[in-house]
């Protein structure tokens, strides 16, 4: 007996598809650095520059001899210790286009394909900004064959950085300090306290910090509370009457200030061939983290804020791009710490 079943009544026979009006982005979209860092005044040139200065060691407790005339030959040039730090403005852009015919077609999840493309482009641009802020790229000037690149936190937090950002001996005197960068493989709680101590000793910053951390760093810090880890960590008793056992560290209060720990999946990537502990643009760097004071030490400066520019339709359909022109200013690199 012939029988119509769900197996033989297919699209040819008139079976309808059940495509929901649902479109879900499955890639990470959170950009904590971009969302959290303060924005300072817009630059007025494509090379942003700022001055840093250091202080001499204290003179000590010995006073001056009474009744002795001043010896002006011992006067000091207190301006000579200043240095100029810089960073380039980078233009980040994301193109998109939709043909005239495609814009007329009824597609899930409904609405205009051009509008959907615009919304997606803005998300992609925001992710690119996050990568640029947290990258290991050094700054470079633009040319006829390559756009300008801004230096990322990977450079400003590197105690051994040279290149275009710390190219002179005077500039290198203001780099992040020795001990402020720790390898993830040796990130015991003692090593983490040593990192914080190094930052405090160099900058005097005993304040609130934010630690933007990759997944492996998050796990390592959470392990500080686990009595099973053989790092001499403490044991503790926790009230679980509410049937919840907390094994997560979101805030770490140290001798040198409180550190809020924020997960970030876009740290320590490199636009080009990565070296050291940097990863390629399409690879999550699980081992990187940046320690930043919760003030205006690190700020973003936009020559042009995030915007969308529609281009002329020459017959093929609507075209546009989203764009931002920005740079990163690190007022005091000595106040930064990092994990790699």
Image (cartoon, grey):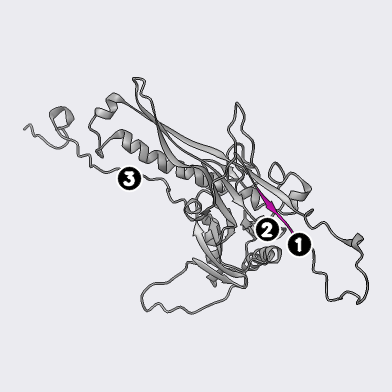
Residue 227 image-quadrant placement: bottom right
Mark 3–mark 2 distance (CA, rounded to whole Å): 42 Å
Disc 1 packing (10 Å; few <14; some 14–19; many ≥20): few
Label 3: few (<14), some (14–19) or many (≥20) C-alpha neighbours in 10 Å = few
Which tag is nearer the camera, tag 1 or tag 3? 1
Q: Compared to 256, does 148 lie above or below?
A: above
Counting residues from the N terminus, which is met first, the one under dot 1 or under dot 3? 3
Q: Quick one: SS at disc 2?
A: helix
Q: Which residues are the magenta region? A: 50-55
**Residue that numbered label 3 is attached to:** 24
Residue 29, percent from left and from top: 42, 48
Labelled disc at residue 334: 2
Q: Is residue 54 magenta?
A: yes
Residue that mark 1 sits on: 55
What is the residue that sits farthest to the top in this orientation?
A: 315
Along the polypeptide, which appears first: circle 2 or circle 1? 1
Please say whether residue 71 is visible from this viewpoint. Answer: yes
Residue at (80, 69) in percent of width and height:
58
Q: Nearer the viewer, mark 2 or mark 1?
A: 1
- Pick the residue in front: 221 or 132: 132
Percent position of residue 150, x then y: 60, 42
Q: Is mark 1 on a helix, strand or loop?
A: loop
């Amino acid at each position: 007996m012939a029988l119509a079943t769900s197996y033989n009544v297919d699209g040819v026979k008139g079976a309808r598809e059940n495509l929901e009006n649902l479109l879900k982005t499955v890639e990470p979209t959170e950009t904590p650095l971009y969302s959290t860092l303060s924005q300072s005044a817009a630059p007025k040139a494509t090379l942003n520059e700022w001055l840093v200065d250091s202080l001499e060691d204290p003179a000590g407790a010995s006073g001056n001899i009474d009744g002795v005339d001043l010896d002006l030959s011992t006067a000091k040039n207190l301006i000579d210790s200043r240095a100029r730090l810089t960073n380039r403005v980078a233009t980040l852009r994301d193109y998109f286009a939709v043909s005239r015919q495609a814009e007329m077609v009824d597609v899930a999840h409904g609405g205009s394909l051009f509008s959907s493309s615009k919304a997606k482009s803005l998300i992609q641009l925001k992710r690119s900004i996050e990568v640029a802020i947290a990258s290991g790229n050094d700054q470079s000037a633009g040319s006829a064959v390559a756009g300008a690149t801004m230096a990322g936190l990977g450079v400003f937090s590197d105690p051994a950085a040279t290149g275009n950002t710390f190219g002179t001996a005077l500039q290198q005197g203001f780099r992040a300090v020795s001990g402020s960068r720790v390898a993830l493989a040796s990130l015991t709680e003692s090593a983490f306290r040593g990192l914080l101590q190094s930052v405090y000793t160099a900058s005097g910053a005993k304040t609130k910090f934010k630690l933007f951390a990759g997944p492996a760093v998050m796990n390592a810090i959470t392990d500080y509370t686990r009595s099973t880890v053989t790092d001499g960590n403490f044991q503790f008793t926790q009230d679980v009457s509410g049937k919840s056992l907390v094994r997560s560290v979101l805030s770490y209060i140290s001798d040198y200030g409180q550190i809020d720990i924020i997960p970030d999946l876009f740290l320590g990537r490199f636009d080009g061939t990565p070296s050291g502990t940097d990863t390629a643009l399409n690879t999550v760097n699980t081992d990187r983290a940046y320690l930043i004071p919760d003030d205006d030490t690190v700020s973003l400066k936009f020559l042009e804020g995030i915007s969308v520019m529609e281009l002329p339709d020459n017959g093929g359909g609507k075209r546009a791009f989203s764009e931002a022109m920005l740079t990163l200013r690190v007022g005091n690199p000595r106040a930064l710490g990092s994990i790699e």
